[in-house]
Amino acid sequence: MVTRDGRVKLLDFGVAKTSRLPSDDDATIPPEQDGVITGTTGYMAPEQVRAGDVDFRADIFSFGALFYELLTGTRAFSGETAADVMIAIMNADPAELPAGVPATVREIVHRCLEKKREERFQSARDLAFAIRQAAAAIGVAPDTASHVAAAPSSSVVRAHLAKLSSSAQLANAERLSGLLRFVVEETLDGRGSQLKEARIGLEVFGRRADSYDPSIDPIVRVQMGRLRSKLRSYYSGQGAGDHVRIDVPVGGYVPTFASRVVDGPLPVHHTPAAPPPADDLRIAVLPFVNMSADPENQYFCDGLTEELINRLAQTPRLRVVARTSSFQFKDAARDIREVGRLLDVSKVLEGSVRKAGNRIRVTVQLINVTDGCHLWSERYEGELTDIFTIHEQISTAIQRALQMQMLGSEHTSAPWAQPRALEAYNHYLQGRFLWKKRTEQGLRAALDHFERAVRIDPTFARALSGVADCHLMLGMSAAEAPERCMPKAAEAARKALQLDDSLAEAHASLAAVKNCYEWDLRAAEQGYRRSMALDSSYATTLHWLGIWIQAPTGRFAAAVDYLEQAIELDPLSPPIIADLALAHAFREDFNAAGMYCRRALELDPHFHRPYWFLGLSSAWGGDFQAAEAALKRGLELCPGAAFRSRLLGALGFAYGRWGKPQLAREIKRELDRIRETSYVPSFELAQIEIGAGNPAGALACLEDAVVKRESFGIFLKAWLSFRPLRAEPRFRSLLAQIGLE
């Protein structure tokens, strides 16, 4: 730190040692024994004053006190004697920061100086991230055409808030508009430091105080991510020439207000032809209930549910919750209000299927979440050979009911290319049913059904897309060598697109092959965006765009944004939530990574992937005992070849870094045994080598992985296990070959 008289002082935030009890508030109290106060009096945390248990979060408090002093020129806590200062630290809040201090900086200082250490930043890494975000929010790049002037007045901010609320981005989004209004008004009224996730969940989104747990229910984080996207859209278009800007920086909920002086004439913007989707246009299709005597007909009910989800997702302005989240309520008692709360929807469609011989009866009802009232109900009967006509009748009737309720004008979904044979369609439904299990056995069985469907009807594009998805996941999971399955995935996806170029899932599958096998990142991103344009409700595209394009290239904030948008469409999807945890781990936010892993396990305690990522993030953060426990549990849940070698690679890395080379060698021997009958990625062998402190061995394995075009090569730059190699020329050459350098 440089003082006003030009002297440079070297400071640390650890607990210092000296040998006398001070009489002034600049001295340091020694840590000679338990129960004795330790620290520098003017900067001690409350737990230090109490002579209690002290950890690194006391340093966060000390930093906050120093930050306050740098901003104001005065101490955060003062008094005539050291005892007076201690009393102030325990009981008083510092004086308000000057009005010119940006709201994001105020929030950082207030959070650092929380009396309860659980409410402070939980690591220096989190604090550093918040500071970078605040700097980005108030800084201006040199090549921009505007600069920040004095902070706008409250009346100017409120006038701009009214303009924002009536914009195309927010006019029909009542919940997002209400969220923005709440955080802005609270900040203007001086309560910005009280904008905590729990409070917003209770006061804005109506969560119940007796059951709301922000670590499990991500409603505030997801909706704030949506709001940030809306604000970016507004200021990059209609609001590009506005003289006031409101932002909510990532990492907090306190908005920033900036005045902008714009050089040159204001740009001209045209109003979009159609308004964006309103919050009220969100619907969930719950799994149809099998009322038949034969439980084997369940695949048919699931298939009908999925078909309706796909058909309704093509309706303009209608947002349909993805299948993964809807199917969390399969075989469960359904409280429609609770379903609506968890899925963040206003309408729910549910139904039942009774199948007897060649006859089928389908009952469907559309329910309003807020009051539980039925908006529409209908029953359909016919021959099983007419199932495609029944699909058409149901989806058309639902669209009409929605039009009467909220769409307000004629909207129809795109024509659906029906399969030629009912037998092919049945194989397709069984394939999708098995593919969703995401196990090696399920993937291989699903592939068999999809291939049968294609043999019966070679023009069935969606069955070909299913073939592509099975080969893709067999490669990504390391169940098979990439050269055996990835070209087959690409071939099937291309055939599907030749038959139906409007098939969003086939565009996403082909993009994934270009992404993770061909390493053509530009073509992959174009493919993902084409898929998004065809079906904005297909959460998988946003998921893969975030985790396989944005995260590998170091754009972690964008990765988190895309994954949060995917969760908005599929809020109860354990795979997407687990991959959001991985994205946070890449940016070294291990607290957030752990939280999302636990959230995924709440939804599916038997899913191995959250344990894998929890173990990795624990190892990357230095908690090797937690890493071992998580990875061993993941291995118990992953008996087949698919993903097992990946968990073993992470465990071998953790043992090496932990200083347990014998255990690391045992893991390597187990991988050698697996290699005798199954594929083992060199990427995982490289993790074990680098964990054991053998960079040359790790580089040799990674070079082999790149030659084989292993799918996880795409993560080479982001994977923290290989951070020690980043300065190596051979490593940088590998990054260049993949397109990451």
Image (cartoon, rainbow, N blue to C red):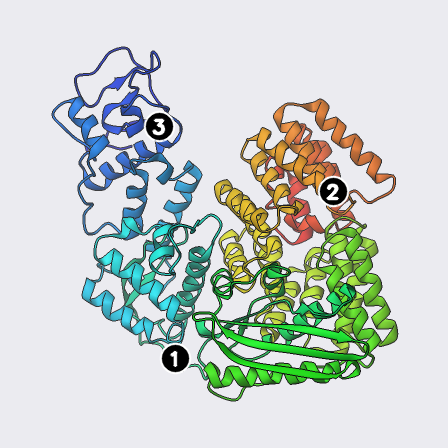
**Residue beneath disc 2:** 644
Q: Secondary structure at mark 2?
A: helix
Quarter of the figure with the N terminus: top left
- Mark 3 and mark 1 in contact? Answer it, CB < 8 Å: no
Label 2 CA crowd tier, 10 Å (few <14, some 14–19, many 20+): many
**Residue beneath disc 3:** 13
Q: Secondary structure at mark 3?
A: loop
- Real-space Cα separation, disc 3 to disc 2, in angstroms: 42 Å
Q: Residue at x 41, y 64 (%)?
A: 227
Q: Position of residue 67 (x, y in %)?
A: 28, 38
Q: Secondary structure at mark 1?
A: loop
In primary-sequence order, the first of circles 3 and 2 is: 3
Q: Is residue 365 above or below residue 400?
A: above
Q: Amino acid at mark 3?
A: Phe
> Image quarter for residue 526?
bottom right
Q: Residue at x 35, y 35 (%)?
A: 117
Give left or right: position of 395 versus 246: right
**Residue beneath disc 1:** 269
Q: Residue furthest left?
A: 80
Q: Position of residue 583 (x, y in %)?
A: 55, 49
- Mark 3 and mark 2 in contact? Answer it, CB < 8 Å: no
User: Is there any visible trace of residue 699 in the rendered image?
Assistant: no
Q: Position of residue 23 (x, y in %)?
A: 17, 17
Q: Position of residue 580 (x, y in %)?
A: 55, 51
